[in-house]
Amino acid sequence: MSTFKPATTLDQVRKNCTLQPLEGATLRDFWVETNDARDHLKHFREDLREILDGDEVQRVLVHGHQGCGKSTEINKVISELGPQWLVVSLNVVDALPVSGNEAADVLLAACMRIVEVAKDHDLKLNEDTLKPIVAFFAKTTKTSTESHAAGLDIEAGADASQTFFGKLFGLKAKLVSDLKFGSRSEESTIHQVRQNKGQLRDYVNALGIAAELAWQEIATERGRLLLVIENLDKVSLADADRIFVKDGPLLSSISLRAIYTIPVFTYYSNEASVIDACFPQRLSVPMIKVSERNGTVSAEGCAVLKQIIRHRVAPSILPDDAVDALIGATGGVLRDIFQTITLASTFTTVRASKVIDRSAIESALVRMVSELGLRICYPRDHAAPRDPRPLLELLATIASEQRSNLASPVRSNEDIQILLKSGALLEYNNGKRWLGVHPLALKYLDELRIHVESVA
């Protein structure tokens, strides 16, 4: 059993401070309880576990900022589930292209993942259930642009096994490839699937239920299947609208227990009520606060963040004063904390001294300011790409209200969504949800000489 300890060398620092969620051995060794530092009244993992343990099959949306620890919190819940649970996890970053996705693409990727997990566990699926699924995918992989020979090749792959499950698994490779790298033209496989998304939903349900029933035959207790679809919070604004607003009913109507991560910015859309109507079960993973809304330091949040860092990096290589500077400048965003540490560890001066001192952290933070500034821009698919000045001015307005401890009016518009996606604007929870400007974004505004004034 491998054991991860606080890093005492630069190589270990880079290994321990990876931006990947905690799981397995790293979850065991690096885990820190953060519930109270996020929200004293609502505990995410307790609420999620209560939903999953209920008899009613639920689809749960989990929202929070990129880098706030959502996936780690979900992994913690999964690690505590009993042996009766068959967890099917799908990382959409691995399965789908960076943009141009729809809800049907997500369901197709989920279907292929269920097939893969069923094969890994040698589940004996009901073949009568699989016949129409195999026929559906065999048909959709034969587009009008494919030659007869190509069609025969596909059929040969599908028939590699005498069982219908083998046929389905034989089709999986092409479907997975088409999802990640294939065309979305009208002749493509993916377009054919999208045109029959209701039928696809039915087959996902049938396959998932068949897998759950087969799992119940070998589970020690009443077997349950849980579908976890992660990193949907990393999709573009346009993709999020297509997946959760326009096709929210499709994702919410599958008959499997499911968890979807969703971008925090989606709830600042004018159509957020559509998502609420489709998904009554939604949970938030709030940021760990480094300050309260009135600007005072959150001692509890800072202490938890320091504990998280100390689980991964020893004081001998990252002194306390460097940690304090890091926490204050990153706004509690775990991704930014670990990215800053990793960046500082590569500096020539640090390689020579073997210590990531405060000076190195401050130099790394300067570079992080520039990186954040580059993300404050209108997306490529925006109707009229233009100068980001309106975004910066809106950011300065919110910072002014924050500095004056005024209640900011609710803003549900695209500019707020863009700022949330960029990470320049952060959503906190201090009894009430509120927006705060990332400390590095404040430095960027200062560099551009966009002054943040206190509101009279």
Image: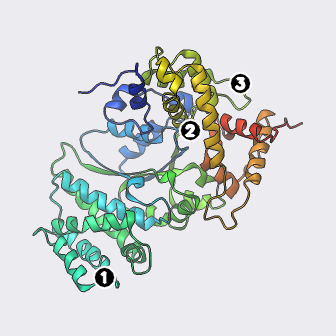
Name the mark on residue 146.
Answer: 1
**Local crowd size for mark 2, using a 10 Å CA cut-off: few (<14), some (14–19), many (≥20):** many
Say how the picture is coloured: rainbow
118 vs 221, nearest the viewer: 118
* 267 displayed left or right of 338: right
**Secondary structure beneath label 3:** loop
Name the mark on residue 236.
Answer: none
Q: Which amino acid, mark 1?
A: Glu
Residue wearing tag 3? 296
The reply to whether discs 3 and 2 touch (Cβ–Cβ < 8 Å) is no
**Secondary structure beneath label 2:** loop
Residue 7 % position (x, y)? 40, 22
**Local crowd size for mark 3, using a 10 Å CA cut-off: few (<14), some (14–19), many (≥20):** few
Residue 307 % position (x, y)? 49, 21
Residue wearing tag 2? 286
- Tell me if residue 156 comes above or below residue 239 in the rendering: below
Among the two numbered marks 3 and 2 on one chain, the one whose residue lies closer to the N terminus? 2
The residue lying at 42 percent from left, 38 percent from top is 72
